[in-house]
Image: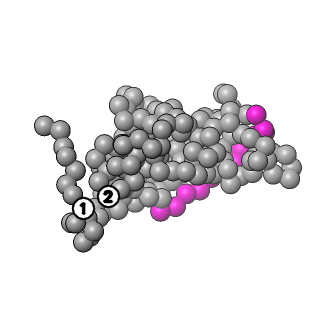
Amino acid sequence: MGEPSHEATTAPQEDLSSEATTTARGNHAEELTGAAAMFANDRASQHLGITVDDHGPGWAQCSMTITDIMANGHEITHGGYIFLFADTTFAMACNYPGSTTVASGGDIDFLKPTYVGDTLVARGKEIVKQGRSGIYDIEVTRGEEIVAVYRGRSRTLPARKPTTSDAAAPPVPTSP
C-alpha cells in the first residue's frame, strides 16, 4: 500500500494525557497532524477498539474485532459498525499531514455477514485527488474474504483563520 508512516497511530491504548495529544486537542497541532491528530481525538473509533495498523498519505490499514454490543437482532454485525469502521479507515487515508479533510459522502456494499469474535481488517487507498476533493476505496476483509466495500468522497477544508483566542495564546516553542 505504500511506505509505513513515521506518524502512524498504532493503538487506541496510547496515553491520551500525553503532551502530544494535548497539543493536538488545542489550537496548536504541531506534534500530531493529519491522520494521527484526528485519531488521537477520535473517541468513537477508540471506544470500538479500532486500531490503526499503519497509514500514510493516501492509504491506511485498520483492524477491529466484533464484540457482543455490535451484534444486531439477527446475531450478525450491525451494518452501522461496519460502515463506521470503513469510514475510520477512509479518514486515516485522506487526512494528510497538515490538512483537515472530512467526508463529503460515503457508500457501502455489505457482501457477507460477520459475527461476534470476527477480526476485520480494512485497507483503504486513494483513487483520485483533485484539488480539495478526493475519492477513496476501502475493502473490509475477514481473513481472505471481502465482507464489505466502501467508497468515500473527501473534501479538504481551507486552513482555519486565527481567532482572537488564538492570538492571545502564548506561542508554542519549536525545535531548532
Instruction: Give whichever of 77, 22 is nearer the camera.
Output: 22
Pointer 2: residues within 10 angstroms few (<14), some, or many (20+)? some
Q: Which residues are magenta?
A: 104-117
Is residue 62 in view? no
Up-down relation of residue 145 to residue 108 (above or below): above
Q: Residue at x 35, y 56 (%)?
A: 26
Asked whether disc 1 touches disc 2, contact meaning CB atoms under 8 Å apart, the reply is yes
How packed mark 1 is, by other alpha carbons closer than 10 Å (few <14, some 14-19, many 20 or more), is few
Question: Could you tell whether 174 is left or right of 154 in the image?
Answer: left
Q: Which residue is mark 2?
A: 27
Percent x, y for residue 70?
Answer: 74, 47
How far apart, in angstroms, are the residues tagged by discs 1 and 2?
Answer: 9 Å
- Residue 140 in picture, x, y percent from top left: 62, 39
| Residue in the picture at 76% in, 47% down | 69
Looking at this view, name the residue that lies furthest to the left. Answer: 176
Tag nearer the camera, 1 or 2: 1
Q: Which residue is mark 1?
A: 169
Question: What's under tag 2, amino acid-wise?
Answer: Asn
Q: Would you say residue 109 sits in the magenta stretch?
A: yes
